[in-house]
Image (cartoon, rainbow, N blue to C red):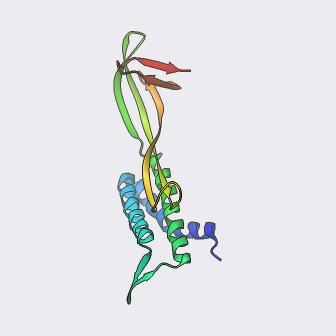
Amino acid sequence: MLNKEEYKNNYMVIWNIRYNDYKKYNELNSLKERIEEEIKHKINILNNGYAIALTGRRPLTEYETDVYTLEVEALIDLLNRIEKETLEHKVFTGRLNNKNVFCEWDKLYKYIFYTPSNDSINYTFIRSFEDWINHKINNKNVRSFIMDNASNIFVIE
């Protein structure tokens, strides 16, 4: 019987070492790309339903399907952890109380893994916008704000 948590933890040992190395050299975006490629490879195997062996193709066993699925889930978790450290920062101008102000926020994305079910026909993953965070106006932190089409800023308290 496959101990899923133990397997995930063991699988992630090398990826956590890579994470620390890439972080040390400020290369987390490169690591994200590498992880995305690894996920695409594993999902391709899952969707094809076979593995390549020395003797040719053979169908995946239930165990192999479980293992590939666990590995993708673990890599998705790591991508979401990295995403919080590599936020997309936006700086722009707006109008608050009829005065021009400098505004900032970070866009947070989340990776989602879908398995064959009502949500998806195949195994797939997406990067989806989750929220705007770390709002600032004139370099001062504010709780949150929204902006209309005319660049008017409305602070949400």
Q: Which x, y percent locates residue 5?
A: 62, 66
Q: Nearer the viewer, residue 150 or 90?
A: 150
Q: Which of 54 and 118 is in front in this view?
A: 118
Which residue is depicted at the point 38% across and 36% down?
89
Q: Which x, y percent locates residue 132?
A: 46, 34
Which residue is depicted at the point 52% across and 76% down?
64
Which residue is depicted at the point 46% across and 80% down?
59
- 72 relative to 148 in the view: left or right: right
Q: Which quadrant would the N terminus be assigned to in this image?
A: bottom right
Which residue is depicted at the point 40% across and 65% down?
38
Q: Nearer the viewer, residue 93 or 118?
A: 118
106 versus 137 height, above or below: below
Residue lying furthest top: 98
Residue 59 seen in the figure: yes
Q: Which x, y percent locates residue 148?
A: 40, 21
144 versus 47 height, above or below: above
Residue 140 seen in the figure: no
Residue lying furthest bottom: 55
Q: Which x, y percent locates residue 151?
A: 36, 19
Q: Nearer the viewer, residue 69 or 89?
A: 69
88 versus 26 height, above or below: above
Q: Which quadrant would the C terminus be assigned to in this image?
A: top right
Count up the numbered dots: 0
67 versus 97 height, above or below: below
- 63 relative to 19 in the view: left or right: right
